[in-house]
């Protein structure tokens, strides 16, 4: 049975509920506010934001289901013929207070023009301010297990895609330790019916809360000092650069006149750009920097 | 006598010296560091940065004179045929500590492909965290006087151009109180020889130090409170959005593999994005917000 777009949107909406419940329970200090909004051109969403929690400084879990006419520039960027579109998904970014707890991002989405032209996209990537090797391996193993349950080719393909996508070209470094990224998966590209692809996307969506609440629990109480906090502000500035300069989801939102406060909820509550900031030569900061410059570099095409 | 590109670059380099001397004298607490750099493809520059001064938290006065081959994407964006280019200029952004002292930006530049294809560009715009009407009028009067000394059509044309350029489309507000902006001025567009256009650009460059040191002197000691500082952080976040999402100079620098730390020296030392931040209903913050939403909106084409 093929799902309708409304059934897919409804599942995403439920996913938002479950993730917010898990994250705020683990945080223990703040809950999510909810702002329902409507898009002038059609559809709307529910922007849920947590701020100044015990663990999360600022986090957003956005649900949206919008429809209408694509602007011409997007039409040509997507290489599609028709104007009518429907798009639904859940998009998440969490900025924690503790520099030893990573930033995380997750997005799952469904796009449809008509019964024959549709696709799924999404991804999860982790941005540790300090790379912990064991946690990084654990994170990738969780994603691999979720992918392998559906198709053994997914993890190698989507991990490579993530390395290409989450790379900050102008800095010649990755945004974090990467993860998985996939886009425009459909019957033609995968040779699988919509329900199988949706089942995969559901598994990715459901993987988020267990992964991040685990990382919250084991890192939220790690002691940190002023240097750690300054390094966190620095890493966050790179996150801003990625999202404003490179991120296609942000660009799509800005170009389609999306709800600006929902699109840019991904930006950190505090950050800054110091010039020529110096870090201890043999410290953990430079170790992380080196990993970001070498370990998740896109393959040459 | 037509100036050579080296003579123009030399004048810009001297302008950098004079501006740094004036700003650091007025600041009184910090001087500019200088970093000479070379561009792998040809040319280089001198990035001068002041940080943690008495008045300026972070400011950059960049000189560069670069040459080489244009990447294809830039070639088509500029609508030029040849690959060889030479570009020189001075680019300035100042982020003050005191929220009652505006951020300022100035850029003067010269671009040349060959003896027949060349142009000047530039502009000055002011970004007050709090709009002071008298100071805003004074600022625009300084720019008008500099323009009027060369051509009575310049100020109306270039002020309108600035309103279009310094507008943050996705926020539906201007970056600040605008100023002047001009690009691709040459013999064909203006009916004036290179030396006359250069004389105008020189006058704009020379206008910067008197304008900003005056604003420094009259605003640097104005008392401010935590609300004022929070509002400054908020306004700075919009400045980041403009520079990373919209600014053509930043995009040109990133696309031509420019020196990244010099290009992004324009970003503020501290800022942040709070979600749904609330400001006093009848306060100066909302008054400034209203001005940015209404007073410098681009004209409909």
Image: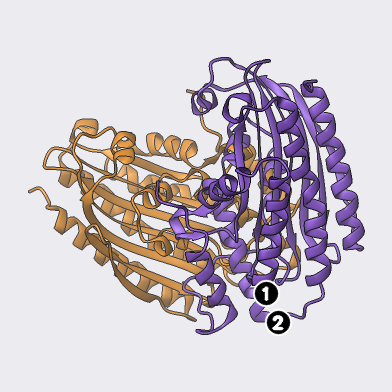
Chain colours: A orange, B purple
Are the residues tagged 2 and 1 within 8 Å (C-beta)?
yes
User: B70 left or right of A197?
Assistant: right
Q: Quadrant of the N terminus of chain B?
A: top right
Horizontal and vertical percent position of residue B193: 70, 25
Instruction: Work out whether A245 lies above or below B118.
Output: below
Instruction: Work out whether A5 lies above or below B149.
Output: below
Horizontal and vertical percent position of residue A42: 22, 59
User: B83 left or right of A108?
Assistant: right
Instruction: Work out whether B200 lies above or below A198.
Output: above
User: Could you say whether the residue bearing mark 1 is in a helix, strand or loop?
Assistant: helix
Horizontal and vertical percent position of residue A86: 21, 50
Seen from the viewer's position, the closer of residues B244 and B10 is B10
How crowded pointer 1 is (Cα within 10 Å; few <14, some 14-19, many 20+) is rated as some
What residue did someone put label 1 on?
Answer: B229
Instruction: Work out whether A171 lies above or below A203.
Output: above
What residue did someone put label 2 on?
Answer: B225
Residue at 53% across / 23% down in the picture? B75
Q: Chain of mark 2?
A: B
* Dot 2 and dot 1 within a common chain: yes
User: B11 left or right of A146?
Assistant: right
Residue A115 tag number: none
Q: Chain of mark 1?
A: B
Q: How many badges with numbers are in the image?
A: 2
User: Could you say whether the residue bearing mark 2 is in a helix, strand or loop?
Assistant: loop
Residue at 60% across / 43% down in the picture? B153
Q: Is residue B274 visible?
A: no
State which quadrant residue B189 falls in.
top right
Residue at 57% across / 38% down in the picture? B251
Horizontal and vertical percent position of residue A134: 57, 52
């Amino acid at each position: 049975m093929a799902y309708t777009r409304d059934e897919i949107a409804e599942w995403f909406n439920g996913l938002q509920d479950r993730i917010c419940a898990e994250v705020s329970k683990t945080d223990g200090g703040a809950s999510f506010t909810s702002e329902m909004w409507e898009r002038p051109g059609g559809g709307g969403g529910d922007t849920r934001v947590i701020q100044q929690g015990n663990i999360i400084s600022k986090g957003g879990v956005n649900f949206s289901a919008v429809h209408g006419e694509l602007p011409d520039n997007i039409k040509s960027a997507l290489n599609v013929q028709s104007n009518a579109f429907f798009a639904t998904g859940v998009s998440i970014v969490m900025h924690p207070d503790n520099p030893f707890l990573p930033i995380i991002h997750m997005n799952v989405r469904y796009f449809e023009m008509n019964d024959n032209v549709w696709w799924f996209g999404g991804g999860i990537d982790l941005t540790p301010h300090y790379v912990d090797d064991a946690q990084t391996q654990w994170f990738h193993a969780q994603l691999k297990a979720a992918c392998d349950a559906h198709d053994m080719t997914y993890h190698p393909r989507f991990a490579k895609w993530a390395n290409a996508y989450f790379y900050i070209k102008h800095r010649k470094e990755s945004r974090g330790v990467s993860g998985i990224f996939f886009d425009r998966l459909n019957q033609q590209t995968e040779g699988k019916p919509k329900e199988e692809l949706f089942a995969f996307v559901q598994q990715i969506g459901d993987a988020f809360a267990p992964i991040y609440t685990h990382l919250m629990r084991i890192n939220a109480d790690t002691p940190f000092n002023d240097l750690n906090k300054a390094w966190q502000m620095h890493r966050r500035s790179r996150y801003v650069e990625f999202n404003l300069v490179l991120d296609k989801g942000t660009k799509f939102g800005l170009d389609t006149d999306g709800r600006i406060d929902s699109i840019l909820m991904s930006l950190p509550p505090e950050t800054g750009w110091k010039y020529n900031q110096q870090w201890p030569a043999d410290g953990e900061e430079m170790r992380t920097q080196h990993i970001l410059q070498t370990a998740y570099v896109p393959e040459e095409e």
